């Protein structure tokens, strides 16, 4: 069992937890705990290029400029799945800033989803009727260049001890909410005692049935699926859903497979969401392989997100028409249950908005 020491958790909040090591956190398959792996992440462009045997020329100048806008952060287990010497490696493309980031492009904005308008109380975002999203932390284990939250004012949304009571009171007063989503940032970047404490507090609200976690950590640091996480998740009375974030089949390996298996053993339903990204996964054969490999690992494809027009990431943009053609192609290659839903998040809408895939007249060839 995990020890629960509420007062200390509240006082510590998020940042120290990133480096704190806790007993019982050792994963079976590695000598290092996840917090140490996280603390040892690559956080500068020179180091990233060096690890991949890529020359400073022509990459470093653009990478350094992009790093000033949104810092580089990549954990070692994710780097190990990249191919050294390949500047177009689909995993590297997701984390290496390119010169294009610094170029202003009309129509690409800082807050494409206008999330600032949906904040209920500090840390709680509600856009849809039956579910609320709790921003447990602003911290991520990896900084994805295309992230629609790259400019989000996390500082103003950091949860403090007082906010917690306010969040719980707000949820208690909203009986139509039956699901709480731990989000961020990456909610699994904080320690398990804090998460267990949140889960326990939420379990006291009768109308909440499901606990969902949106996290990329089990993919980028599979050691995050440690005994302490499995312990509180397994003991929680909620129906549990973990939505991971995988964009390319090369992100999956034997470690992610093991981590997913352990989660399933404690009753967690695993779903995946991807973002369609030019130069990473804008290909029907890659997306088909992704769905197949996810299912082999016990994960169901859920959403394929259309690109959000966030400033600094325009070079990843795939048009809705091209994305729809890709999904049409997937439908001919895969059983229906392995085809992710192509959606976009539009400000002010009451759900994600499906992108129509019924018409394949568009003259777009897919590979
Ligand atoms: C995407 C999102 C959800 C989850 O939507 P589902 O369609 O249930 O997956 C919930 N709340 C917010 C604010 C979201 O952005
Ligand atoms: S893990 Fe998710 S929230 Fe964090 S930077 Fe990547 S896409 Fe954004």
Image (spheres, helix red, strand yellow):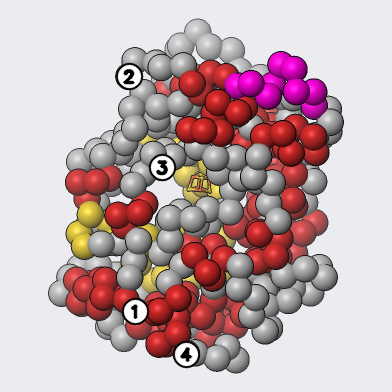
In this rendering, does residue 1 appear at all? yes
Provide the residue span drawn in magenta: 54-62
As measured in the structure, the alpha-carbon distance from the residue carrying label 2 to the one carrying label 1 is: 40 Å
Q: Is residue 61 magenta?
A: yes
SS at mark 2 in the image: loop
Q: State the SS at label 4.
A: loop
Tell me the quarter of the picture where residue 34 sits: bottom right
Q: Earlier in the sequence, mark 1 or mark 3?
A: 3
- The earlier-in-sequence mark between 4 and 3 is 4
Q: Which residue is mark 3?
A: 149
Q: Residue at x 84, y 31 (%)?
A: 53
**In the image, is 69 to the left or to the right of 117?**
right
Q: Which is nearer the N-term, disc 2 or disc 1?
A: 2
Above or below, comparing residue 141 to residue 98 in the picture: below
Which residue is labeled 1 in the image? 202
Q: Choose the circle earlier in sequence order: 1 or 4.
A: 4
Q: State the residue position of label 2.
A: 107
Q: Earlier in the sequence, mark 2 or mark 3?
A: 2
């Amino acid at each position: 069992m995990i020890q629960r020491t509420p007062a200390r958790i509240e006082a510590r909040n998020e940042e120290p937890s990133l480096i704190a090591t806790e007993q019982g956190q050792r994963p079976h398959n590695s000598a290092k705990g996840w917090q140490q792996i996280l603390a040892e992440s690559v956080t500068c462009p020179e180091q990233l290029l060096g690890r991949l045997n890529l020359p400073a020329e022509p990459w470093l100048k653009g990478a350094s400029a992009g790093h000033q806008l949104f810092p580089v952060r990549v954990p070692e287990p994710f780097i190990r799945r990249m191919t050294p010497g390949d500047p177009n490696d689909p995993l590297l493309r997701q984390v290496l800033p390119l010169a294009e980031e610094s170029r202003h492009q009309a129509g690409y904005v800082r807050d494409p989803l206008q999330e600032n308008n949906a904040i209920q109380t500090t840390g709680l975002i509600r856009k849809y009727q039956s579910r609320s999203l709790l921003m447990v932390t602003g911290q991520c284990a990896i900084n994805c260049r295309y992230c629609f939250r790259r400019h989000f004012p996390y500082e103003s949304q950091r949860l403090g001890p007082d906010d917690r009571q306010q969040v719980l009171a707000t949820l208690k007063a909203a009986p139509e909410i039956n699901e709480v989503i731990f989000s961020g940032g990456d909610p699994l970047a904080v320690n398990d005692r804090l998460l267990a404490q949140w889960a326990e507090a939420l379990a006291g609200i009768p109308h909440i049935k499901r606990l969902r976690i949106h996290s990329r950590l089990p993919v980028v640091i599979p050691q995050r699926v440690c005994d302490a996480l499995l312990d509180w998740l397994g003991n929680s009375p909620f129906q549990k859903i973990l939505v991971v974030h995988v964009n390319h089949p090369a992100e999956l390996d034997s470690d992610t497979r093991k981590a997913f298996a352990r989660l399933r053993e404690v009753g967690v339903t695993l779903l995946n969401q991807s973002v369609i990204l030019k130069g990473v996964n804008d290909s029907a054969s890659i997306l088909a392989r992704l769905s197949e490999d996810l299912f082999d690992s016990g994960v169901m494809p859920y959403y394929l997100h259309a690109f959000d027009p966030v400033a600094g990431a325009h070079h990843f943009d795939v048009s809705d028409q091209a994305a729809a053609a890709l999904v049409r192609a997937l439908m001919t290659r895969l059983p229906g249950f392995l085809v992710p839903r192509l959606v976009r998040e539009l400000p002010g809408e009451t759900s994600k908005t499906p992108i129509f895939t019924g018409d394949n007249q568009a003259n777009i060839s897919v590979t």
